[in-house]
C-alpha cells in the first residue's frame, strides 16, 4: 500500500495510524513544511556515551510523513560511542562527514559480526532490526549523517532496554545471564532517572 | 507488493530474493507442501536456557513462502527462559498451551517494560523488532506456540549477539558498558563454540 | 508501507483507515493491551456446523492493530465442520492441538484440491483468499489454533454468502447453477434470520 | 516493498517469485513488450455461462509484471453469467462498454449483498477477495472491461472450486451442506473433464 | 500493509492518511458506494490539448479507497494530445475503445522512448512515475479508458509543472535550459490563470 | 511484503526481480558488502549542468538491496544546476553539507511550486515521483548528500526525457507545446550523442 497522495505532511495533533499521521490540509501546506534545520547543529551531549544526537524524524520534520525516509545526525567526541541499538522499523545508511568511526552490526541467526572502519565520505549500511553500533576510534571528533528507510525508524538502545526500564534486576539476569551485581551497577548508570527524554 | 500467485512453495535450491524464494513449479506441488510436522515434537533442549525450540519457518516449511506467516513451538522446563531477543522482520503472538509464563517486551524510545503472566489459553503479542522474553515461573513445564507475521521472522538473541559473536570483549564493553570481566565470563557461556547451529 | 510506530494499539472508537485503526495514545497503553484471554475458552457452538469459534482479531484484541498477525481458536465436535470459506485479507496456518482434522483448500485457476489429515501437533497452511475447510473426521473433539497474516483477515463463508445474504434465490441459481429448489432449502438453513452475529 | 526498477518485463521462462517473475534483460526490451492485443477480440464462449473471457494478465501481457495492474475483457450473451467467483490477490473495477449488467458482491462477515445494474459507461468495484458476479439481464450482448490491482489477480470460480475439483461429493456436501444429489448433478456440469484450461 | 477490512469507502470529510481516507461507517455503506457514473460522459474539452478528461479516482468514486485501483476516461479529438505527464503513485494501462492513438513513454536512466500505435481494443502500459503521452494521430475521435494501480494516482503534467506553476521564468530556464523567451511564451499558455481546476 | 531475510546482498549477475536482485549466498557475504566508498569523491562534472553526481544505489552498493534506502552525492559548482527531474520509485531527502542551494519541487494536480534556500546543515524533502531541482545560487561550491526511500530510486531528467530520447522533434512539440525550433536547439544539447552513460 503505497502513499496515496502527492504528499501528506503530518498533522501531529491528530492520532497516529499504522501508516503514519493524518495529513495537514493541503491549502495550509507551505514550502516550510518540506524544509528543516533539525540537523543544522549537534544535539546536547549524552553521557556516558560522549555523543550527541539530533533527529529529523516525523515528529521533528512532519514533511517526511508517509514518504519512507528520515535522517539523524550524530556527533561523536574522541572515544565516543553510539551504543548497541536497533531500529525496529528501518534500515539505516550512515555516511561519515568528519573523522572516522568503527561501525558494526551482528547478523541474526548466524551471530556473525560485520565491522569496518568507515572513513570520511564512506558509507556503511545496517539492515533493519539488527543490533549495531559505532565507535569513534580516532583522535578527533566525528560527524555521522544517517538516513533511514522510514519516517519513524524507532530506536531501541540495548543499555536502556536492559538497564533503564522497570524490569527488576533479577528478571534482567534471568533473561540475559548477566550477573545481578553487574545489572545493579548498570541500572545506576542507565536506570529510569537516567533515561534521556 | 502483494503475493502474485495463488501460492509460491519455496524452491530452497534457488537463490533467495528480497521477497522470498522462487516458486516450486506448480505441477510438482502436492498437498504435502502445505502440511508440516515440524512442531509435532519439542526440539532439543538448549542449555543454559532449559527451553527447546522447534521452528516451522520457510526453511522447515517451504509452503509458507510468500504467505506472510510462520510458527514455532517452545517447550520450557520449570525455570526455563526464552532469553531476551528480537525478530527483525516480524511481530509475534504467543499462545500458552500448557503451564504459564511471564512474558514481556521493552518499548523503544520510552523504554517502558510491558510484562504479564500469560496462562494456559491466553495470548500475548510482541511488536516487530522489539526485545522480548518469556520465563517459565511455574513449577511445571510450559508449552508455548508462536505465530509470526513473516515466513522468515529472523531471530537475534541478545546473549549471542553480545557474547557469541566475534566482537572482541573490549568492543562489547565499549558499546554496552557491561564490564569487560562480565563480558569475558559470558563469552565462555555463549562464545562461538557454544552457539547453537 | 510498514508500521511507523513501535506499536499502535487500536482505538476502536475512532474511524478505521485502510491500514487499520488510529492508535491509542501511548501514555494510556498498558501491558493489558498486549494480553488477551479471547481464546482461553471455546466460543458458543454454531449450528449446523457443530464447531465453535473464538476470535482474537483487532476488534477483540486491539493490541494486534498494525502488527500483521492475529489468531482464532476452533473447537470441533466429532463430525463437526469448518465450512468452506476464505479470508480475503490473510493467509492462515492451523495447528491441531487436540484430535485430528481433514484440512483442504482448492487452488484458483487450476482447481486442484489439496487435502490432508492433520494430526495433533501438525500444521497446514491455507494461502490468502482461497476457499478452504476442515472436517473433524475423528471420534473425539478436535481443537485447532489458527494464525493469520493480518490483524483482521476477514471471513467469507460460502454458505452464508450464497444462502444467507439478501441475494434472491433465482440470482443465486443463475450465478452458481445450484438448483433453485436446493437454494431455497439452504436459505432456510443459512438465511438472514440464521446468520450468526 | 515497491518495484525497484523502471519496469520489469516478465521473463516467463524463469521461475516466478512471490513478487513476480524475474525481469527480461533491459537491452532486449522493446515497445512491443508494453503493448498487447490480448483483449482486441472476445475469447471463446464458455458453456454453460454464455460468456467469453480474454485475459491480459502477466502471462498474456508480460509488460505488466511488477506494475500492480492488469485487465480482462468479458463478452456476455443475453442471459450470460459471470459466475460467482473471487480474486484472491486483487480488487477489480468493471466498466460496461456495451449493454448493461447486474453486478454484485457479498461482504464478508456481515453477508450483505451489494448489487446494482451497471449501464454503459458506468463503473462498479469489487473489493479484493470477495465473491462477486455479473449477469447480462438485457436483451443484447454486453461487453465489460475489467481492471485489477495486481498483474496476476487469481481467479477462483465457486462452481469449479466446489464441483470441478477432485474433492469427493460427500466432502463437498459436508463443507457446504449442498445435498449430495445436487453436488453429483453439478459435478457432471463442472467436473474435471469439464474444467476449461 | 494490506487493506485491513473487507472494504473502506472513503469518508472524504475526514483528514486523509498516508494509506487513504478513513472509512465510512459500515452500516451507512450501500451498493451506491461501489457504483459510479463518473466516466459515463466525456469531461469538458481542455484547450489547448483538444482532449477531455473524466476521472474516477477516490475523490469522485469513494468506493475505491484502499483498493489499489482507479480509472479515468479520455476523449481525444483528431489531433488531440494527452500531454507529457507522469503519475507519481501508479502504473497505468490504457485500452483504446474508439479510434487509435500513438502512445509512448520514456524510460528513466536510459532515456529510451517506447512508442506504439495502439488501435481499438489494444492495450499499452505505462510504468509508475515515468513521463508518457498519447496523440490521436487518426482522423476520427478516439476514446481511451485507463486503469491505475492506485485509488489516487496523482497527475503531474509537464507543461503545468514547468509553465503553469509560480516558478519564475528564469528558474525554469535554469533547470531545463529551455530559453527564457520560450518559457515566457508558454507561461502565457499554461500560466496560473490558465491552470484547469 | 517486507524483506524476508536479515539482509540480501545483491547478486548482480542474476536477473533482477520486481523486489530486487537475488541474494548473494550468505557464507560469501563479508563486512565489505555493507561498506562503500562510492560517495567519497565527486563524480565527473556533467556539462552543461556544472554538477557532478556520484551514486550509491544497488548497482554501486549491492548491500542496500532489499533494504529500502540508498544515497547519492552531488557537487555543484557556483551556478551549477541539478536539472528538473523525478525519481519514479522513491522520495528523497537532501542535506546540504557545503554551501547553499535553492531547492524546489512542483506538486502534482495543484501545480504549486514549493521552493526554499537550503543552507549548510539543513534538509529538504522531495516526495516520490514529483519533478524537483536544485540550483547553487551561491558564489562557492555546494555539496549535497541525498538519501532515497529505495535501493534503486530511478532518475528521469526532464531534459533527457524530452530532448535526449529518440522521440522526433515534432512529437516532442506536440506533447509539450515547446516550439519545434526550441526542441531542435535543445536536442543538440541533450540529444542521444550527448546522453551521459
Image: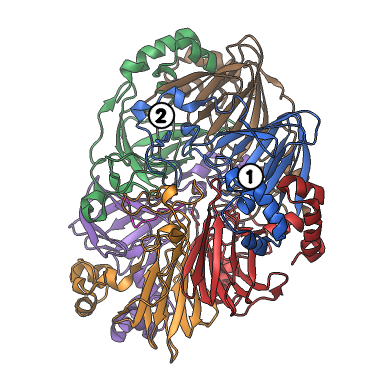
Chain colours: A green, B brown, C blue, D red, E orange, F purple
Q: E153 and A144: which one is in front?
A: E153
Tell which of E175 and C188 is nearer to you.
Answer: C188
- In the rendered structure, does residue E149 fall within the stretch colored magenta? no
Q: Which residue is mark 1?
A: F25
Q: Kindly identify which chain the residue marked by label 2 belongs to.
A: B
User: At 59% across and 79% down in the image, what residue appears?
Assistant: D139
Is residue F120 toward the left or the right of residue E154 in the image? Answer: left
Residue E19, x across and y down, in percent? 41, 50
Mark 1–mark 2 contact, CB under 8 Å?
A: no
Residue at the location (35% across, 40% down)? Answer: A16
In-front residue for pair D86/C25: D86
Alpha-carbon span between mark 1 and mark 2:
32 Å
Residue E92, visible in the rendered structure: no
Q: Residue at coordinates 27% horizontally, 27% vertically from top-left?
A: A45
The quadrant where residue C93 appears: top right
**Residue D12 visible in this rendered orientation of the protein:** yes
Q: Chain of mark 1?
A: F
Q: Disc 2 on helix, strand or loop?
A: loop
Quarter of the picture containing the C terminus of chain A is top left
Where's residue D84, x and y in %? 63, 60
Structural crowding at the residue carrying mark 1, measured as other residues with C-alpha within 10 Å and reported as few (<14), some (14–19) or many (≥20): few
Main secondary structure found in the magenta portion: loop
Give the numbered dot on residue F2.
none
> Which residue is located at x 62 percent, y 15 percent?
B80
Whole-percent x, y for residue D26 in the image: 55, 67
C191 lies left or right of D197: left
Q: Which residues are magenta?
A: A1-8
Residue A142 at x, y percent in the picture: 32, 35
Question: Which residue, given by chain and number where applicable, does mark 2 sit on?
Answer: B108
Residue E152 figure quarter: bottom left
How crowded pointer 2 is (Cα within 10 Å; few <14, some 14-19, many 20+) is rated as many
Residue under disc 1 on the same chain as residue under disc 2 = no
Amino acid at each position: 500500500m503505497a502513499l496515496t497522495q502527492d504528499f501528506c505532511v503530518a498533522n501531529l495533533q491528530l492520532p497516529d495510524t499504522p501508516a503514519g499521521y493524518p495529513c495537514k490540509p493541503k491549502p495550509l501546506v507551505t514550502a516550510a513544511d518540506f524544509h528543516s534545520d533539525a540537523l543544522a547543529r549537534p544535539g546536547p551531549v549524552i553521557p556516558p556515551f560522549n555523543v550527541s544526537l539530533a533527529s529529523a524524524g516525523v515528529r521533528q520534520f512532519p514533511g517526511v510523513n508517509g514518504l519512507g525516509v528520515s535522517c539523524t545526525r550524530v556527533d561523536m567526541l574522541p572515544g565516543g560511542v553510539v551504543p548497541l541499538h536497533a531500529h525496529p522499523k528501518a534500515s539505516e545508511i550512515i555516511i561519515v562527514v568528519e573523522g572516522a568511526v568503527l561501525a558494526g552490526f551482528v547478523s541474526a541467526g548466524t551471530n556473525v559480526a560485520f565491522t569496518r572502519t568507515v572513513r570520511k565520505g564512506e558509507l556503511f549500511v545496517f539492515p533493519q532490526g539488527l543490533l549495531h553500533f559505532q565507535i569513534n576510534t580516532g583522535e578527533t571528533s566525528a560527524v555521522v549523517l544517517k538516513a533511514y528507510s522510514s519516517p519513524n525508524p524507532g530506536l531501541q538502545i540495548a543499555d536502556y532496554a536492559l538497564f533503564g526500564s522497570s524490569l527488576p534486576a533479577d528478571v534482567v539476569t534471568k533473561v540475559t545471564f548477566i550477573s545481578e551485581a553487574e545489572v545493579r551497577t548498570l541500572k545506576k548508570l542507565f536506570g529510569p532517572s537516567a533515561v534521556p527524554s
